């Protein structure tokens, strides 16, 4: 058990996002830059390259397969659990591994088929810089995993299953004795929400600082594995591509740098964070696919008109080769995106996670593409429509719905979840919090919504809209009004084919279902409640929380 054993003391752990990490960066001290450090150098013990950064960090890389086999900081070994090393994916196999020193930089290169992986050490720094270049799909290189010995850190956060012995789904979702659930999938954070992930004892911190994800897939709101801990030890991840709940194809090319960083208990220096880190010292190292700052451009926008200032806005660029994003300034929508590879991109403006504007933009090396005020076209934000009633807000998320926040870090069966059943009455002011964020065919299909209409409203046909953020096993809503009118079964929109709702992610492809309800379906007595029944239909899925299901964005009845 982590923290147990002779002389062991309890350890604590934290995961830091951008703001918290930046606030704690001063604790870690500045980067060493190119300063020379006593002890910096490397040796060959016959089976490994052994590198001493001169900053109390010594690591070993296997000359056979490129695994990181040892990670010693201040005399303590942190690497390894269950007889496994730290490596790309689950290990590459026989590779060609070479080392080259260039002044205060040591670069270890690993060649495995078309894949290239790199470790770089800098004199006087207790950090290890990594790049991975994947040229095609001949190699399943989707992640780098730092494997940490048991007992070094304690993690009983949602992304841990150290103290959760009961398996409740597949082999990766667990229940503790108190009914709370744990899984390596329950990381809470979207990519846009964090710069680093790791653990600290208060005197030693071990962190994975993510790359800018320009060659990853899924965009700014993607959720994937960040870390985990079990009885055997812990893992820190940099996900290069993960097939679960993916909304777009894999990108190829160089991913990185991402950084394994040790500190004296605080967060890593903010200078290591994506968007801040610069590596001019790597420009001439010959890293495959490396593009220096001089080969990149910038996109800047003076503002965004037509925003709903109650919500944050994100501007993203994407094409088949790369992706980037940044937050728009709350006051006026100003934004600036640097370090962009040359090319033509689709620019998307998101209100929270809902796309409300798209356009095309071209980027050239060494230049800034300046955009005039972007105006969100009328009708692109579904919130602009006049409604008789609305449940939730159109944000591309199930935010505000029952259990919505919990579902980013727990299984739907978690003891903390409110009942998934229960009907909703319009007009009481608690419609959204009473409506479950997820609907499943085998759990709460057939949910009822009660509402009144005026005589004038009941005399006309109306459009009902149901927005969803993802679906599992083709789940989609069919509606019935007052048991006299039932909609056709809508066609299923394109959605990821893997688990989503049970592994902490509501993010798929936002889609709006529209239903034209005839006037003949409404009750003409304005004192009586109309009854809307929402069923989940699909021929796929299994049972319970793995039956066909969908996540709800908003539901409204238009004027």
Image (cartoon, grey):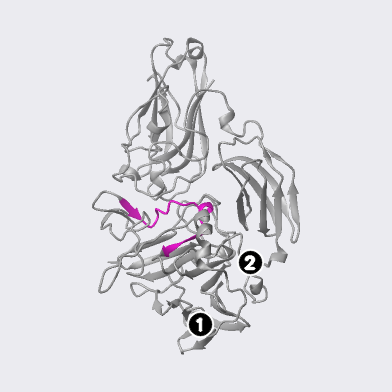
Dot 2 lies on which element?
loop
Residue 119: give x, y in percent of width and height. Answer: 54, 75
Looking at the picture, how far across and down is residue 417, in whole percent? Answer: 32, 41
Asked whether residue 194 is drawn in magenta, I would say yes
| Location of the C terminus (image quadrant) | top right
Q: Position of residue 222 (x, y in %)?
A: 50, 51
User: Which segment is the magenta one?
Assistant: 181-199
Write down the residue under mark 2. 278
> What is the distance, in whole Å, between disc 1 and disc 2 at their CAs?
22 Å
Q: Can residue 144 be spotted in the picture? A: no
| In the depicted structure, whether residue 60 falls above or below residue 365 | below
From the viewer's perspective, is residue 303 above or below residue 95?
Answer: above
Classify 342 as above or below 119.
above
On the image, the x and y values in percent for residue 70 come to: 43, 78
Identify the residue at horizontal 55%, vertical 78% (top origin): 124
Q: Residues within 10 Å of mark 1 (few under 14, many from 20)?
A: many
Residue at the disc numbered 1:
51
């Amino acid at each position: 058990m982590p923290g147990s054993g002779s002389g062991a003391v309890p350890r604590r752990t934290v995961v830091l996002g951008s703001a918290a990490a930046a606030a704690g960066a001063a604790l870690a001290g500045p980067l060493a830059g190119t300063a020379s450090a006593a002890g910096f150098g490397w040796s060959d013990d016959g089976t490994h390259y052994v590198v001493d950064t001169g900053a109390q960090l010594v690591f070993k890389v296997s000359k056979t397969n490129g695994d990181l086999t040892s990670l010693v900081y201040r005399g303590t070994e942190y690497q390894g659990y269950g007889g496994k090393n730290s490596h790309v994916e689950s290990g590459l196999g026989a590779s060609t591994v070479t080392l080259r020193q260039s002044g205060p930089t040591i670069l270890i290169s690993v060649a495995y088929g078309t894949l290239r992986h790199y470790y770089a050490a800098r004199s006087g720094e207790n950090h290890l810089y990594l790049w991975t270049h994947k040229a095609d799909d001949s190699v399943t290189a989707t992640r780098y995993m730092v494997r940490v010995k048991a007992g070094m850190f304690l993690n009983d956060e949602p992304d841990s299953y150290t103290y959760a012995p009961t398996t409740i789904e597949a082999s990766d979702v667990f229940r503790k004795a108190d009914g709370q659930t744990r899984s390596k999938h329950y990381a809470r954070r979207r990519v846009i929400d964090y710069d680093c992930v790791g653990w600290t004892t208060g005197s030693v911190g071990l962190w994975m600082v993510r790359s800018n994800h320009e060659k990853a897939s899924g965009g700014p709101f993607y959720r994937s594995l960040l870390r985990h801990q079990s009885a055997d030890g812990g893992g820190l991840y940099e996900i290069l591509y993960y097939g679960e709940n993916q909304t777009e194809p894999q990108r190829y090319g160089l991913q990185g740098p991402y950084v394994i960083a040790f500190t004296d208990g605080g967060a890593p220096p903010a200078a290591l964070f994506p968007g801040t880190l610069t590596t001019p010292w790597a420009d001439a190292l010959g890293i495959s696919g490396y593009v220096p700052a001089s080969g990149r451009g910038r996109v800047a926008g003076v503002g965004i008109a037509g925003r709903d200032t109650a919500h944050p806005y994100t501007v993203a660029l994407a094409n088949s080769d790369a992706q980037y994003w940044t937050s728009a300034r709350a006051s006026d929508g100003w934004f600036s995106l640097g370090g962009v590879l040359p090319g033509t991109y689709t620019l998307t403006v998101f209100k929270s996670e809902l796309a409300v504007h798209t356009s095309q933009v071209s980027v050239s090396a060494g230049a800034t593409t300046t955009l005039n005020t972007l105006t969100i076209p009328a009708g692109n934000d579904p919130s602009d429509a006049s409604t008789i009633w609305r449940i939730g807000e159109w944000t591309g998320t199930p935010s505000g719905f029952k259990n919505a926040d919990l579902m980013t870090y727990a299984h739907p069966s978690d003891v903390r979840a409110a009942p998934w059943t229960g009907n909703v009455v319009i007009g009481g002011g608690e419609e959204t919090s009473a409506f479950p964020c997820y609907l499943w065919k085998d759990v709460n299909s057939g949910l009822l919504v009660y509402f009144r209409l005026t005589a004038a409203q009941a005399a006309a046909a109306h459009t009902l809209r149901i927005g969803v953020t993802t679906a599992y096993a083709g789940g989609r809503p069919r509606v019935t009004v007052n048991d006299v009118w039932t909609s056709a079964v809508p066609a299923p929109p394109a959605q990821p084919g893997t688990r989503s709702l049970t592994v902490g992610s509501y993010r798929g492809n936002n889609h709006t279902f529209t239903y034209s309800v005839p006037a003949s379906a409404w009750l003409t007595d304005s004192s009586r409640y109309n009854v809307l029944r929402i069923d989940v239909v699909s021929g796929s899925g299994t049972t319970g929380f793995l039956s066909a299901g969908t996540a709800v964005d908003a539901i409204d009845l238009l004027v």
